[in-house]
């Protein structure tokens, strides 16, 4: 349902404007889709650290059968790289917009990965 990279919630310029336009963001099936799968990198801003976000995201992603990683970034945001069936990735994105209790997601920026990394599970990067 999203047409490529950029803000995917209603929070407009929360992330400094402009969103994600790098190269390869709008490639349709060529951008991040491999054999019916999709691979994305997402950055969440807001109150997303110190609320159990990584642990909860890992549990939800594993339950959905997704692979990838989640990590805190120094700027206070959380980065998630995920791959799997498009419908399952969309389910994770819907959960990410809410997050665990105590979280307040101000924005979710996404970009398709050019190729799916060779992950075999969903893990927390420290």
Image (tube, rainbow, N blue to C red):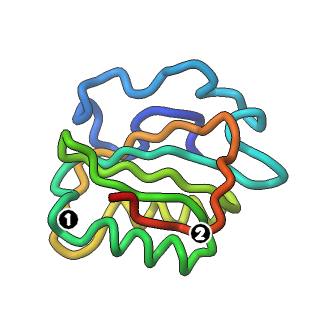
Q: Is residue 111 left or right of residue 95?
A: right
Image height check: is 1 above or below 22?
below
Q: Nearer the viewer, mark 1 or mark 2?
A: 2
Which numbered tag is attached to residue 121?
2
The local secondary structure at tag 2 comes to loop
Residue at numbered disc 1? 103
Name, please, the residue furthest toward the front.
126
Name of the residue lying farthest toward the right: 35
Question: Residue 65 lies in what quarter of the image?
Answer: bottom right
x 24%, y 72%: residue: 52
- Label 1, label 2: how many angstroms apart (C-alpha)? 24 Å
Is mark 1 in CB contact (under 8 Å) with mark 2?
Answer: no
For mark 1, give the secondary structure.
loop
At 59% across and 36% down in the image, what residue appears?
3
Res 47 quadrant in image: bottom left
Question: Residue 31 appears at what percent x and percent y?
Answer: 69, 34
């Amino acid at each position: 349902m999203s047409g490529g990279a950029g803000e995917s919630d209603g929070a407009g310029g929360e992330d400094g404007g402009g969103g994600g336009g790098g190269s390869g963001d709008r490639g349709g099936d060529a951008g991040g889709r491999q054999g019916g799968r999709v691979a994305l990198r997402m950055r969440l801003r807001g109150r997303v650290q110190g609320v159990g976000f990584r642990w909860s995201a890992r549990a939800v992603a594993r339950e959905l059968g997704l692979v990838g990683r989640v990590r805190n970034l120094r700027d206070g945001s959380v980065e998630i790289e995920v791959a799997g069936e498009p419908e399952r990735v969309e389910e994770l994105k819907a959960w990410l917009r809410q997050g665990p209790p105590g979280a307040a997601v101000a924005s979710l920026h996404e970009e398709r990965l050019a190729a799916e990394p060779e992950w075999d599970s969903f893990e927390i990067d420290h």
